[in-house]
Image (cartoon, rainbow, N blue to C red):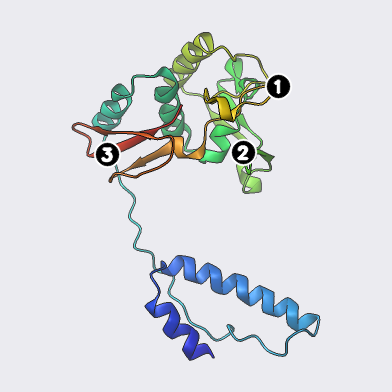
């Protein structure tokens, strides 16, 4: 069984990191099955996978970063990308930010939740629950966006969506996760206006 599974993994188009996660999940399922006497053995226990990833981070220069920011006509998107670059927060944590999380007088941002499956949830890890510094340049952009947006109450999302289908009776929903897509190649996504940034080598996908 293990040899057959390894052969199928070899012929699949999935990344080895994905396969390793699948093996881990199936391994836990079979362990619970053995515990409750539903199965007698764990067929993936001896399946070997590779942990090496082909992913390589793309390092951009400050000049490229400036080109990307200046190419975005909307203050919302410029502030969004700058927040991502200046805080290194996960996209789900950025989209969950409310104005009450921006601690202007303390020069920091409170991170206590993430936006997933259309609702607030706990941060991905316990270590993520805390604060990140609020750089003066980022604070300036956030102040400008706060003065411009029609949703500036403490309970409003910092990066809300203007799309009618993403609004509720009480307040607009945050931007979709695809708003934070910056890639080295063109990506086709719904409600996405892609733009190749001249001089940066990147394609930016922005969503209202």
Q: Look at the numbered discs 3 and 2 and tell me whether their residues touch, using CB distance below 8 Å.
A: no
Residue at (60, 29) in percent of width and height: 173
Q: Look at the numbered discs 1 and 2 and tell me whether their residues touch, using CB distance below 8 Å.
A: no
- Residue at the spot of label 2: 115
| Residue found at the very far right of the displayed protein | 36
Q: Answer few, some or many: residues within 10 Å of disc 2's Cα (few below 14, many 20 plus, some between 14 and 19).
A: many
The label nearer to you, 1 versus 2, is 1
Q: Residue 202: which numbered mark, if any?
A: 3
Q: Is residue 75 left or right of residue 103?
A: left
Q: Is residue 182 left or right of residue 47?
A: left
Residue at (44, 31) in percent of width and height: 207
Q: CA distance from mark 1 to mark 3?
A: 37 Å
Q: Residue 21 at x, y = what percent? A: 54, 67
Q: Answer few, some or many: residues within 10 Å of disc 3's Cα (few below 14, many 20 plus, some between 14 and 19).
A: some
- The mark nearer the N terminus, 1 or 2, is 2
Q: Residue 121 at x, y = what percent? A: 68, 41
Task: Give the image quarter of residue 65.
Answer: top left
Q: CA distance from mark 3 to mark 2?
A: 26 Å
């Amino acid at each position: 069984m293990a040899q057959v599974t390894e052969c199928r993994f070899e012929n699949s188009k999935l990344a080895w990191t994905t396969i390793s996660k699948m093996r881990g999940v199936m391994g836990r399922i079979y362990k619970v099955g053995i515990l409750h006497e539903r199965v007698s053995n764990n067929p993936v226990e001896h399946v070997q996978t590779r942990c090496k990833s082909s992913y390589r981070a793309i390092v951009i220069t400050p000049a490229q970063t400036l080109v990307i920011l200046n190419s975005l006509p909307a203050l919302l998107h410029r502030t969004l990308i700058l927040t991502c670059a200046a805080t290194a927060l996960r996209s789900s944590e950025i989209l969950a930010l409310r104005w009450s999380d921006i601690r202007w007088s303390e020069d920091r941002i409170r991170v206590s939740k993430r936006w997933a499956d259309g609702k607030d949830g706990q941060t991905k890890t316990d270590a993520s629950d805390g604060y990140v510094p609020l750089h003066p340049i980022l604070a300036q952009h956030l102040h400008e966006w706060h003065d411009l947006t029609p949703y500036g109450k403490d309970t409003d999302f910092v990066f809300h969506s203007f799309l009618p289908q993403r609004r509720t009776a009480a307040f607009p929903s945050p931007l979709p996760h695809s708003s934070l897509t910056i890639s080295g190649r063109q990506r086709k996504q719904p409600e996405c206006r892609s733009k190749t940034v001249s001089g940066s080598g990147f394609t930016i996908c922005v969503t209202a």
